[in-house]
Amino acid sequence: MNQLDQLGTRINLICNVFDKWIGQQDLNYNLFAVLYTLATEGSRTQKHIGEEWSLPKQTVSGVCKTLAGQGLIEWQEGEQDRRERLLSLTEKGKAHAAPLTENAQEFSDKVFATFGDKRTTRLFADLDALVEVMEKTISENKK
């Protein structure tokens, strides 16, 4: 197994554990992505959410229709671009998402407190460096 395969395996393991935690919140990944983004970042477009969470446009659209039907989100025109439709949580949506964001913060705090500050700092720095090396390698191969 080459090293990119090994990296992919580990990333997949992390994603599976995160999916398990999301399931404990009585959600699926797609619902979590939309609710969490709107709760933590405020108004956003469907496109932004899809890009941030690597979700297809149709998936985000379907989730948004479901949440709008439940009265949890609403659409607004963008201030700079009226063609842009921003999603935001309704008051009901904010109340629904509040425990989710609290639980996510608590989960993160516990995980990284156990993992340790030094290891966390090193992990993030190493991942940032790996992304940089990968981007550089891709751009060099284009020439």
Image (cartoon, helix red, strand yellow):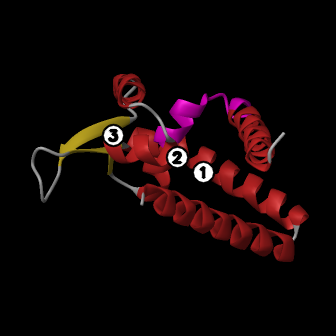
Q: Are marks 3 and 2 in contact (CB under 8 Å)?
A: no
**Residue at image point 66% right, 28% down:** 26
**Residue at image point 90% right, 62% down:** 114
Magenta residue check for 33 = yes
Residue type indicated by callout 1: Thr
Residue type indicated by callout 3: Gln
Q: Are marks 2 and 1 in contact (CB under 8 Å)?
A: yes
Residue on which the image places disc 1: 101
**Residue at image point 68% right, 36% down:** 22
**Residue at image point 79% right, 73% down:** 122
* Dominant secondary structure (helix, strand or loop) of the stretch shown in magenta: helix
- Image location (x, y in percent) of residue 88: 33, 46
Specify the segment rendered in magenta: 23-35
Which callout, 3 or 2, points at the residue further toward the start of the chain? 2
Magenta residue check for 43 = no
Q: What numbered label is drawn on residue 36?
A: 2
- Image location (x, y in percent) of residue 131: 60, 62
Marks 3/2: CA–CA distance? 13 Å
Q: 98 left or right of 104? A: left
Secondary structure type for disc 3 = helix
